Image (cartoon, rainbow, N blue to C red):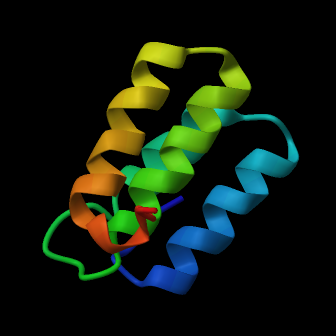
Amino acid sequence: MQVGKDNNNIINVANAFLDYAKYDFAIATYEKGIGPDPNQSFYYKQIGDIYSYKGENDKMIDYYLLYLKDKPEIIHTA
C-alpha cells in the first residue's frame, strides 16, 4: 500500500496497523510524515508511544525527546 504525505492518510493507515498490533508497520507509516511537515512532532509522539507499547524504552525516549525538542512549550514549569 502506498502512503503519501497526506496527514489524514498517514494517521488512518498507521491506526489500522495499530488495531492489529502491527507496530513496526505503524512506525514505518508514521515515519513517512516526518520531514518538513509542520505536524512532525505529532509523529514523534506517536512513534514514542508505540515504542512504549513494545517495551523498547531507549527508542521511546529518543522519540519523546524529539517531540519535546519540537514542542518545548508543552513543558510546564512551576
State whether residue 70 is above or below residue 36: above
State whether residue 55 is above or below residue 35: above
Query: Given the current orientation, which residue lies at the most extreme right position?
Result: 19
Residue 53, by quadrant, is top right
Q: Position of residue 24 (x, y in %)?
A: 57, 31
Query: Given the current orientation, which residue lies at the most extreme front position?
Result: 78
Residue in the image at 86% along x and 41% along y: 20
State whether residue 29 is above or below residue 54: below
Residue in the image at 27% along x and 61% along y: 34
Query: Given the current orientation, which residue lies at the most extreme left position?
Result: 36
| Residue 36 in view (yes/no) | yes
Q: Nearer the viewer, residue 67 or 19?
A: 67
Q: How many marks?
A: 0
Q: Position of residue 39 (x, y in %)?
A: 35, 78
Q: Nearer the viewer, residue 17 or 61?
A: 61
Q: Position of residue 75 (x, y in %)?
A: 40, 62
| Residue 3 in view (yes/no) | no
Q: Image check: 23 left or right of 66?
A: right
Residue in the image at 50% along x and 44% along y: 47
Q: Nearer the viewer, residue 17 or 42?
A: 42
Residue 55, by quadrant, is top right
Q: Nearer the viewer, residue 27 or 44?
A: 44
Quadrant in the picture for the N terminus: bottom right
Q: Image check: 35 left or right of 12?
A: left
Residue in the image at 37% along x and 74% along y: 4
Q: Image check: 34 left or right of 21?
A: left
Residue 49, by quadrant, is top right
